[in-house]
Image (spheres, rainbow, N blue to C red):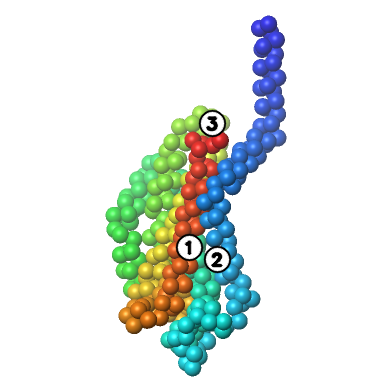
Amino acid sequence: MNKNKISKLDKKMDKIKEKEEKGLLKEQKMNRTLRKFLNNKLAVIGLFILLAITFSSIFAPIICRYEPGKIDLRNALKPPSRAHIFGTDKLGKDVFARVLYGGRISILVGFGSGIGSAIIGVLIGSYAGYKGGWFDKTFLRISEVLIAFPQIILVLLLVTIVGQSLWNLLFIFILTGWAPMYRMARARMLSIREEEYVQALKAFGVSDFVICYKHMLPNAIGPIVINITLSTAMFILEETSLSFLGLGVPLNLPTWGNILYAAQNISILRNNWWIWLPPGIMISLFVLGLNFVGDGLRDAFDPTYQG
């Protein structure tokens, strides 16, 4: 009986080993993660909102017949109608066109800054957490200095120094936003580097870069992806705040924040709601969708939530 049990156990272990060699277990894990994400209704709704707004902005020339910068003073401050779905602003510009075209730049700033800061923070944080030593201590102190100051204050300071432009804003957001991602990647690596497979790779003399970025980083990618969605929402809100103050993207470029800049006029805020309400709703929906997707990714990647 014992021999039969041992032989059955050996057969099961052989099957598991064969699946590992063929990569089937990894595929099953990915399928389980995807299934877990798709079972989250709020995450699916959030993903639909993000895709709908993003594709509407990309295909704005097809959806809208007006140019975002076209001035028509004879039709200034017109309420929503068939001709102008969201009405017109004080210069006669079509608000619907400005919202769609403005989404291009606002989404570019959000995702560009989120991905850029993630790349820098993860590359530095992963190696610092794995290697330690002076490299880790140096960047840890730099990140502490950046986090000690409110990010909006640093951004305002740098904008006044380097000037206003789309690429300057992207550069400033990345420069001031990589520290939280660095600390998260570093914390993950500090826990992963004590795993047995890492010690075995060291014993075989595998390069530190190969161990860090090829073998360890994929095991920490889940929280990083989640954090990118949250940081993207934060950067979109920061761009909106700066543009509302007149310190973000130059006013000649349509963004959601620049459209809201017109709401500084109290008469427009009271009497012309169609100028500031549509971009405000668009910002709220996009940020809400990002938060829903982030929560869904957290539930899908976190092993404690796996079904």
- Name the residue: 38% across, 41% down: 133
**Could you tell me which secondary element the residue under label 2 belongs to?**
helix
The mark that comes first in sequence, 3 or 1, is 3
* Residue under numbered circle 1: 285
Task: Pick whichever, 144 or 30, lies toward us.
Answer: 30
Q: Residue at x 69, y 31 (%)?
A: 19
Q: Which quadrant of the figure has residue 26?
A: top right
Residue 296 position, x and y percent, is 51, 48
Residue 66 pos. (x, y %) = 57, 83
Identify residue for label 2: 53
Tell me which numbered mark, 1 or 2, is placed earlier along the sequence: 2
Name the foreground residue: 297 vs 184. 297
Give neighbour class at mark 3: few <14, some 14-19, many 20+ (Cα, 10 Å).
Answer: some
| x then y, percent, for residue 280 | 43, 69
Q: Locate the C terminus by quadrant.
A: top right
Tag 2–tag 3 contact (CB < 8 Å): no
Residue nearest the observer in this picture, 225 or 219 = 225
Label 3 with label 1: CB-CB less than 8 Å: no
Q: Residues within 10 Å of mark 1 (few under 14, many from 20)?
A: some
Q: Which residue is mark 3?
A: 197
Q: Classify residue 37 as left or right of residue 187.
A: right
Query: Where does the N terminus fall, quadrant-wise?
Result: top right
Query: Looking at the image, can residue 178 be seen?
Result: yes
Q: Considering only order in the chain, which callout, 3 or 2, is on the residue closer to the N terminus?
A: 2
Secondary element at tag 3? helix
Give the distance between the C-alpha atoms of the residues marked 3 and 1, in whole angstroms: 43 Å
Amino acid type at mark 1 = Leu
Between 110 and 209, which is closer to the camera in this rendering? 110
Residue at (37%, 69%) from the top-left corner? 241
Tell me the amino acid under the disc marked 2: Ile
Q: Secondary structure at mark 1?
A: helix
